[in-house]
Each structure stands twice: as structure tokens, then as C-alpha cells.
Image (cartoon, rainbow, N blue to C red):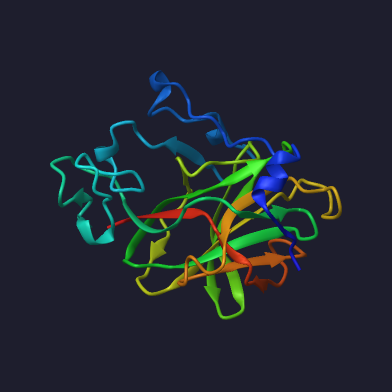
Amino acid sequence: MRAWLLAALLLAGGCLRAGLEAPPPSDRGQPHEAGHVDPKRPEAAVADLPPELGLWCGGAPCVDSDPCTVESCQGGKCLHSSYEAGPCLDQSMTGSTNLGANINEGVRAVAQTFTAGRSGTLAGVAVQIDAAKSYPLHLALRASGQSGPGAILDEVTLTTAGSALSQVILFPKSVPIAKGTRYAISADYPSAPPPGAGQAVAMWGGQSGDPYPAGGSWSSVAGATGTWASDPSGDLFFRVYVRP
């Protein structure tokens, strides 16, 4: 069973560093360092959300400060904004961190499932993973069912170990997303030593209880190719962007 630890205790103990800093304003629109990729793995890119919040139908508010959700973002345009927008924010789970899932400490991989609220193609995901070590972070979008995360639909490997919710991670393929279908985002570190005491590479932040009823958190001792076990302790922070 995966060890869930209070984020405050982890951070107070100095085990984890703070999230990745956003690049200076002059670097906006350019790939962040986390987007530099391992040439031997599928290409990934990380784009910071623009400072002009109305330019994205995403987690940030539109120009009138009203969050642009699936209901108000249609055809790539926020209905209550005069700005053209990017992909709509479909599903998300964010808030104040009060627990976290250690990756590579007892379990090889962790995952969060979600249920798509609209059909389209995957535009990107965001996760809140704070790293203590420098192994490349591997993320996968998976099919999901009653037994948890399943077949990999697409995957990326960053050259950094962490990522923040302010960063949108792009996948190499245009994966179709179907409304009402459950998917999973999994995270692991294939190049890290075997999981065990003191081997934690990073913590995926989240909240206790069931703040996201349309999905849940899972863990796998064997990693990407192993079986998954549900963890009812809480949900992990994420955002999923879908292009109409």
C-alpha cells in the first residue's frame, strides 16, 4: 500500500523542493526547461500558460475573471470572452495540498483517473509533482476501467523530475477522447533505483477524502507494466485539456 504523507510534514522536513518556477515574462510562449526531452523517448513539450489569462480556455480565468469551463468554452472560444482561446479545460482537481503520494517509495508508479466530460482530442495535461531527485519524469495517458489504469494510449518523458499545474505537458500523438470514458494519468521514474525506503524521487500533491468523485488515485509496485491497486486516501492534482 502506497504511503501517503502530509505534504506539510514532507516540506518541513526538507525532503521535497518547491515546484518549478515559472520562466520570466520574456520567456513566455517558449518551451520551459522541463520541455527539453530525451531524444531516445517520445517527444514531449511543456508550455507555460500565457500571462494574458483570457487567451486560454483553461484553468486560469478568462478576461472577465469568470473561469472558462467546458460549458462556457465551445469551438475553442470562451463564450463570455471576446478573445480566441485555446483548448478547453475539461477535467481538473486542484486546491490546497494536505497530502501527497510518494513516487518510488514503496511503489514504482502512481496514477490519477478521470472521466472525460467532452469528446475531442487530448491537448495536454498538467500535474503537481514536486521532485527531490533528478531522474526524468515519465507520464502516460492510459485507458482505465474498474481494475484501474490500463493500456498506454500515449506517453512522454521529460528531462526534469517535476512539473507544476501552471505547465501544460503536450503528448506526441493526437489521442481521441470520448465523453463519459474514464482515463488515467500515470507517473513513474523508469531510470530510478528500485522503490524502497529512502528512494522517493518526488511527491504528487493532492487532497484527502474524495474531492474528485469521477476518478481516484492508484499505485503500482511493479510500475508501468504492473497491476494497480486503488488508494482511497485522496485524489491527486491534475488538469486535462481537450481540443474540440
Would residue 105 be found to the left or right of residue 122 on screen? right
Q: Can residue 135 be seen in this view?
A: no
Would residue 39 be found to the left or right of residue 121 on screen? right
Query: Residue 156 location, x and y as percent?
Result: 57, 48
Instruction: Name the residue at 53% across, 35% down.
Output: 35
Instruction: Name the residue at 34% across, 33% down.
Output: 50
Instruction: Name the residue at 16% across, 44% down.
Output: 81
Would residue 26 be found to the left or right of residue 219 on screen? left
Figure quadrant of the C terminus: bottom left
Count the marks: how many? 0
Instruction: Name the residue at 71% across, 45% down.
Output: 10
Q: Which residue is more in the foreground, 158 or 70?
A: 70
Q: Which residue is more in the foreground, 149 or 203?
A: 203
Would residue 33 be found to the left or right of residue 94 on screen? right
Residue 131 vertical placement versus 77 (above, below): above
Residue 113 vertical placement versus 203 (above, below): below
| Res 137 → quadrant | top right
Query: Residue 133 location, x and y as percent?
Result: 74, 38
Q: Is residue 100 visible?
A: yes
Figure quadrant of the N terminus: bottom right
Query: Residue 129 location, x and y as percent?
Result: 60, 46
The residue positioned farthest toward the right in the image shown:
197
Residue 239 vertical placement versus 144 (above, below): above
Residue 112 vertical placement versus 41 (above, below): below
Query: Residue 15 location, x and y as percent?
Result: 75, 40
The residue positioned farthest toward the top in the image shown:
26
